[in-house]
Image (cartoon, coloured by chain):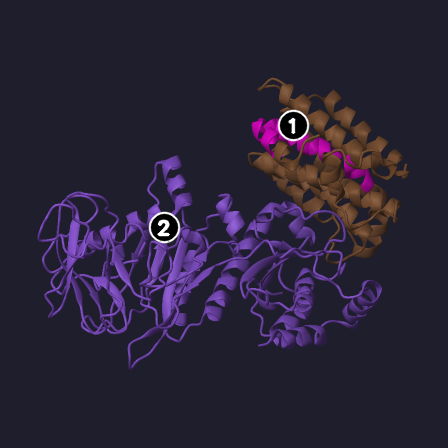
Amino acid sequence: MRTDEQLRRDLAKLQKQKCVAFACACAEHVLPIYEKHFEILSNRQQLASSTNVRSTLELIWRCAFGEEVSSTELESADAASSAAIPRIDVDQSVEAEMSMAASVGVLEALDATKSDGAGAAERASSNALKAIMVACYIKNPHLPQDIDPIPLIASGKLNAQPEWEPLVHEFEVQNTQLDELLHLSSNAYVTAEWKSHHLMHGILLLKKLGWD
Amino acid sequence: MTNRFYKACALSHLSCLALGVLLITTLAHGSIEPAIDTSAAIPAAFIDITPNASTWAYADEFFWRLSKGYCGGDPVNNSDPSGLDYITSDTSGTGQHGARFHRSGDAVYYVVEDGTSSDWSRNVLRKVRIGTWSGENIQLDSAYGGGNISMAGAQSAAERGDSNTAIKSGSDSAINDQLSISGAESHESGYLAASKAATGVEVEQSLMEKAPVLRDLREGSGIWNGVKLFAYSFENTVTLNAFKNQDMTWSAYGYRAVSFNEAVDTVSGDVTRAGIGVFTSLAPSSSSVLTGSFRLAEAPLAPLQTGLPVLGNVSVTREAYQEAWAQLAVKERVGEIQAQLGRSASFGETYGVGVVRLPADSNVHVVISHASRYGLPRVTLQDGELLIARKIFPRFHAEKEIILWSGQADAELLSTGATRPVCPSCTRALQSMDVPIATPIK
């Protein structure tokens, strides 16, 4: 599996629209975690509707498919989504930390449409992993907190431990999708089928976390 | 302010919860050790020109370490058992290279390397002692041949005053004269040259010889990365009492050092202490620098240059210099971390940055804190930076983590900042400790 450095290197090889696609896929995987916990967080922070975040992601997928989306639409979606993402300085619970990481990747995907994309795509990946990592801790409070699981998983050292299975799975999925994007011809866009595939990963992730 | 006081202040201004957690954790684990290994990072951000030394700063084998500033000692061996000062030549063997010196009012010539001239065959020393002739000038009155020793004008002189060593141009001499002299004489040593000329002195060649990393960069990029000294000036060209407000710019890829002198004895003119600091975003450690992984930062330089005159009007200590450095380092690192955080910074993800002076070595270290309970920081730490274990005080603000950690480590907190505006509670705690906050407050 890719280390951070390898991820960065490979993302730099991608065309912008593929960076957007990668960021969207990463966000797509973990958005169900956010949606699952939105109601609790919304009660605490008076957040706007979680559907705004989902709608924004759908909008960015259109960019990834090669469709024209106006900057006005993107800005509007940005504002609507931002109002629905929890602030972890307001709500310092671990659930808020998890949900913020699980939703902010959508905004990174949005940023990927504006910039060269690689940096934002990397952050979308990082946020997805962070969300799942915190979810693993929530589900398994006994897990040691004095380790840094992400690099350990990247190097294959935690992969046999069932508690980390969702995180290992996400690592593998991200690796696979990046491989696919790297092999896609330079002018090609991802397809709706490719998107659906990653939607399924999100559903599977909830199952792995026992939150379906 | 003592570390003990800092610690006391830190504790006094933390919430009861903080204290409670601290006590509980302490009871559970015994004394809390900072989760860092400080032994590997011994930055040497300064050189000190110690009292009674002459005023030349010496760039040692690894210039960026600047671990030792001395003037006038044997620049070849980096120490001078005899306690004498020398000017050296890097010429060797038989050849047409030479320089000769004489003391003012004294006909004795000291010859630096010459294999042919009978006139210059006396006292072939390859290095000329200058340290014992207090009160007299040692003049380089002639040079001949090719090689590294050259002199452009008869007025050039290598001169030493009572309390200052300097290689400077004669009163009517152009700066190039001095450059020729210093370039030759200091070829092996990396002496820093000084001049009364407004344009200052460039000693790129000599320092480049002793800065392999810089040389590598130069070769790699094809860009000359020299070291420039500028704005040196002497108060008095006769007595050479002091130089003031001098800046030294290390212009290699924005790597810059600034030096200033301090505590000039107005009676004797002795420069009792001076410092040269290497500015990077991190407190450089020998290991990080030697691998070439240090980061070259231009960003802090502008505000520093603005700030220096303020510092220069007072007797600036090494500590004050470190504190000025700390402010800049915190600002810079916070800016970089913010950029790395991306959108999550807008939703409360926060990192704290502090600069501490550790009691073990009195050097400064950059520390990074993260309030999150889980996972690695999602920012890239620079070599030499210390990650404060987030698990020690989970859920505290990043700034308070730094405060508490500093107390535990008995470190003096020089400056702090965070990637979001510092909250009122942390602001009060820091201000009550007289710790400057380098980033915006809420």
Residue at mark 2 = B251
Residue A54 in the figure: left or right of residue B271: right
| The image quarter in which residue A136 lies | top right
In x, y percent, where is residue B223?
A: 34, 39
1 and 2 marks on the same chain: no
Nearer the viewer's eye, disc 1 or disc 2? 2
Q: Nearer the viewer, residue B313 or B49?
A: B49
Picture quarter containing residue A201?
A: top right
Residue B22 visible in rendering: yes
On screen, residue B95 versus residue A147, left or right, reads left
Instruction: Look at the picture and state if A23 lies above or below B39.
Output: above
Subunit ID for the residue under disc 2: B
Q: Tell me, yes or no, if residue A68 can be seen here.
A: no
Amino acid type, label 1:
Ala
Which residue bears the numbered disc 1? A64
Nearer the observer, B178 or B60: B60
Chain that is coloured brown in the picture: A
Q: Quadrant of the C terminus of chain A?
A: top right
